[in-house]
Image: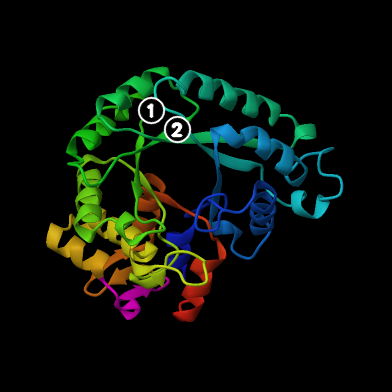
Amino acid sequence: MTQSLRTLLAGLIDYAGLFPPAKLDMGKSAEAFARHLRGEHEFALGRFICPVSRLGELTKAASALMPGTFATSGYREYAESTRPWSISAILDGPLPDSFVESLDEIDAFNEHHSQEQNGLARIDTIELKVTRPDAIDEVLDELPEEVFPFFEFDMAQDCRGFVAALAGNADSGGAAAKLRCGGVKPEMIPSTEQVADALLALAAADVPFKATAGLHHPCRSVQNLTYEASPPRAVMHGFVNVFLGAALARAHRLERDAMLRVLGEEDPGAFGFTEVGASWRELSIDTASLAKVRETFALSYGSCSFDEPFEDLAKLGVL
């Protein structure tokens, strides 16, 4: 693996095994996350994604798999060489009614899992949907500083108000956007225009983002949307298109037409990864700049499969 590809992938994939199309039960999801933490591609693994309403279930299923002194008996092979689990909690109740209650549940989870005998883990990010820009300020007024928020908004709307609200909170600890890039039905996949407009607005305002859904594959291509016997198929966005495109947007201040071309690229050979940098056709970014973009702007994406992205990269010959 070249250094630039490793830089693009570092901490890129948040594990969302609980969610469609995989939709594993909590026990299997926890075991998969623990296994990936000890695997060859551990460097690319980010957080375990869990709804707030299922945090108690996570504690019961995963405590013995988390690093710790007493709770790991019987699963010591998972825990001894791994880092404490990082958790991203999804607020799955209606705002604002469930917000304070959700924060209490997050505090209780963090307190419980700060002790080795309970398995070491911490919720340090939350994800929630908002339907109006001023809801962002309302949430941030109540949110403790130690929890970083990702706000999902509908990319079919004009995103500028949401981006402006996120940018306006940069001095108070910041907040980030969450872009939904797919789903289990073709109509759930946003257009390249919608993704491009959101990425360019976020880049111009210096607002970081994560993505979610529909990014199992490196390059834009026609794929199965579920794991059913006769699944629906559609053109899915590629995570290399989205994240290298975001990096190039920051490095070169891409115009909309160029951004659309990167996101719409379906030839894997158009992307290059060397020790010194990554490229799409005539545009390139050096590895150090790519690392900075990944740390400060293009943060991660949620995927219900951690294996599929690497299997596809191997098929493309870049691993």
Location of residue 313 with respect to 144 vertically, above or below: below
- Crowd tier of the residue under label 2, counting other residues whose Cα lies within 10 Å: few below 14, some 14–19, many 20 or above: some
Mark 1 and 2 residues: CB-CB less than 8 Å, in contact?
A: yes
Q: Position of residue 104 (x, y in %)?
A: 56, 20
Task: Indicate the position of residue 257 as horizontal and vertical percent values.
Answer: 13, 62
Asked which secondary structure carries label 2, the reply is: strand
Q: Secondary structure at mark 1?
A: loop
Q: Determine which residue is flagged by label 1.
A: 173
Numbered tag placed on residue 148 in the rendering: 2
| Quarter occupied by residue 163 | top left
Question: In the depicted view, which residue is nearer to us: 30 or 83?
Answer: 30
Looking at the image, is mark 1 or mark 2 earlier in the sequence? Answer: 2
- Is residue 266 located in the magenta-colored stretch of the structure? yes
Taking the spot 59% from the left edge, 24% from the top edge, the residue there is: 105
Q: Is residue 255 visible?
A: no
Q: Position of residue 286 (x, y in %)?
A: 33, 63
The relative height of residue 153 versus residue 279 in the rendered view (above or below) is above
Q: What's drawn in magenta, residue-wise? A: 265-275
For the residue marked with disc 1, what is the amino acid? Gly
* Label of residue 105 in the image: none
| Neighbourhood count class around disc 1 (C-alpha, 10 Å): few under 14, some 14–19, many 20 upward | few
Rendered residue at 74%/29% (across/down): 115
Kindly tell me whether residue 115 is visible in this rendering.
yes
Q: Kindly identify the residue that appears in the image at 63 percent across and 65 percent down.
A: 40
